[in-house]
Amino acid sequence: MKYTILFTKMLFISCLLMAMGISVTGCSDDDDELQSGYGYAQFRLYKSASYGNGESGKTRAGTNELEYLREAQKMKIVLINNEDGTEISQTVGLDAINDQDAEFGMRSEKMQMLAGEYTVVGFYLYKIEGQELVPVISGEPEKETVIRVVEGGLSLRDITVNVVERGSVKFTLVKDITTTTRAAGDAAYLLENVKYVTIEVKDLYLTGKIIPPLKEIPVTYQEKGKEITTADGEKKTYIYSVSVSDSLLYLKAGTYKISKYTLLDRNKKSIEVNVGNIKENQFVVKDNETTEVEVPVYMRTNSPKLKDYKALKAIWDALDGEHWSYIGISHTVGCNWNFDKDMDLWGDQPGVELDTEGRVVSLNLGSFGPKGDVPDAIGDLEKLQVLTFGTHSDQVGGYLEKNLKAYMSVEEKKAVRADYYETFLRKDLKRDWKKMGFSEPLLQVIDKVNTEQKPNLRYPVQSSGSQIQTRSGISLKDVSPGRLTNGICKISASISKLTNLRQFFIANGKFEGFEEGTDLSKLESLTDVEIYNCPSMKQFPTEICNLPNLELLNLANNPQLESAVLLGGLKKLADEKSPASKTIQMLYLGNNNLTEIPVEFKNLKKLGKLDCNNNKITKVYPLGKDVNLVQLTMDYNQITEVPNDFCGYEDVESFSFAHNKITTFPNIFNAKSVYVMSSVDFSYNEITGFAGENGTGDDAFKGINASTLSLAYNKLKTFPGILFKTNSQISTLALAGNGITDFPKGALDGKYTNYLQSLDLSYNKLKKLPDDFDATKVPYLYGIDLSNNSFEKVATGPLNVDHLNVYAFRNQRDEQGNRTVSVWPTGISQCPSLLAVYLGGNDFRKVEESLTGFRIVEIKDNPNLMIDVSAACNYIKSGYLLLIYDRTQAIRGCDALDLE
């Protein structure tokens, strides 16, 4: 009992010293002034197993040893003064930065001592329990250990302690990709989904037993690169991935082997368990050393996700992947796929979307410029939901490329489905006012009618003699027919195996058709199909007729299809025996050679959106009331007549037959409808009258309930009062360019005439407005354009409307082209709400108006005009008033204007 003998010996010495009046437990504070002849001593404790090579500080101890050095919190040191032989002891605190650093050494508090030479007799180590010091170990040097205290200095001496040998371990999960099979089954997961790992290790040489498992060790996913040299000498960066434990773990020194691991996700649910099927992985733990241990995580090359990735590589190889160069907006321009990395990272490619298990669910390739036939490997992507080889938006912003993905909310899916209509077909008055036959001054009124806000009449230009700047109304359009962005030709029949496919798009390439034998009848999830701008496709892709749940079909921009071929395919699609005829809701056929609407379209009971824009249609068959169209676009055809029972009109939003040869406005709408149509456009036809205009009973014209109606650029000679007499509810009406000569009194009689807010009568032959055109008829009229007519004086009836904001009265001419209006409408600036007046192109003379109440005044091209604008000069300078004038005009009173 060496420990007991040493303790008794030290206790006796302590008592003797106390009897002699010598302090044995004190320690001076470092801040105390050091007394003359004194110095400091400090001791450093180290683990015996990892301390140097047996220097003088090494100690002998009993059988006791500490589990961890940090257990020691106090130390009593016993010393002999070598000059007088006295023995002293002091108890001092022990400290380290933290528990982990304590295993690499601890320092005692400094001890103030008389300068001299001392021999270390031994030491006690204590831990603190409550108020008591509990001894945990004692020891003494194996050979004489001397410490020399220097006056005014600090002397250090190392002491070693018997502590269980331990080292730290840092685990790194590395991939073991193999072709072997195992009984444990297969788990499809990404290494980055592993957030924790539980590891069991076996002590091979000390106990031979499996120690308690190291549970739920947090790990962090990392991708790293290393330089490799290819067979031809090219240097490349190879990407690999690992998951590294976030903290060090401690094991007793020895040799170990990993016997089991369990991978866990962020919720600590098991992803993968591997027992006994782990590569050789012995590792040695040494005292106070960190051992890097690789844990080989098993992955099979024929696992589902790796099978997907091999299919991606096969597709890349088949479609000239080596020369791909990205041209879209979602990734770096010019980028390509990269296979210089671990196989399980092959799925991380631009244009590829993976699910949480690493399976390929979306593949978007059009913007990479792929070329060739899509190989059989496409059928191996069994989880694929979205497949695109180009779309209609490839060169108009790439909306689909950016937003078309496997997992979309209901709203996101609606937006993706609506993109073609919104981009190319929907008529927005704020954007397409010119196309719909509206004049530029009414833009402000159109803005108010559509937003129910005060018109924005401030243009971003300065007062000048130049023409007012406005948008052209021309929007970016789709890829021109025949212009290609990829070289995809045939698609393998293995596409028939993609039973999870929901959206399939192919566009702007050399697509010829599906491979013979393609059967799409089992693709029950496939609802959206686009085959757009494929000039090499000479036959209708009849395979789509067998899709059991087809809802959207876009075949637009394929003018290479002969009329008979396209018509025959559409008849088959709409045949009552075709599965697609019972489900299709959206059909886009614009920019083709279609000559008629197939009578079989009456079978498309769910059809809501139909686009036949820019075809060669002359004949429109009645589809019947069971086909309730919501959005219809039939512009730029050769249609002469619309049958009364063309379709149902219960919930129409937009209805357009612009740029045809229709001579009579059809009696297909009803002013009594509870549904308000957003836009009805029959502009640029040859309409001279209204069906049922002189009829009675059921044959009489029934009117229309539409927010916007355009009859611009037709052949009407008289203002169509029939619209208001039938109680039509119209907010915005375009009648420009008809050559109207007569606006009879009573033409504005009707229950809902007061709904009218914007009226465009420009480019007609009117000489006057009826006497009853006043605030009692159109009390909420916000804007009117009477430009380019034959008025002999300013029409003042509209100026009495309290809500009028915009008044245009430009370019009045007689039949010989002479200017017809010269008298300025005195008092026009007093109109209560009038903010913008366009009076250019007339022959106004002297003007006695201050112009201070306006925001826009156009007076240019009035060669004899004389006006003093001094009252409005500050408004002009501040930009509040925009004056549109000629530099040669006689304008006085404002030095801010650029005048000759």
Image: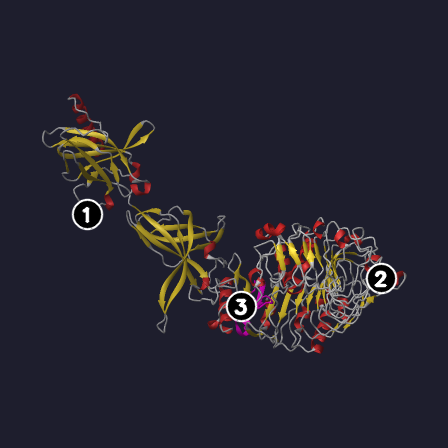
How many C-alpha atoms fall within 10 Å of the one at disc 2: few (<14), some, or many (≥20)? Answer: many
Q: Nearer the viewer, residue 439 or 389?
A: 439
Q: Check residue 367 in the rendering and tell me which mark sits there, or answer none.
A: 3
Relative to residue 297, is residue 82 depicted above or below? above
- Magenta stretch holds residue 352: no
The mark closer to the camera, 2 or 1, is 2
Q: Position of residue 232 (x, y in %)?
A: 36, 74
Residue 860 lies in what quarter of the image?
Answer: bottom right
Q: Nearer the viewer, residue 453 or 506?
A: 453
* Circle nearer the N terminus (3, 1): 1
Callout 1, which amino acid? Asn
Q: Check residue 701 in the rendering and tell me which mark sits there, or answer none.
A: 2
The secondary element bearing badge 2 is classed as loop
* Circle nearer the N terminus (2, 1): 1
Residue stretch in magenta: 369-394
The single residue placed furthest to the left in the displayed view is 83
Relative to residue 876, is residue 700 depicted above or below? below
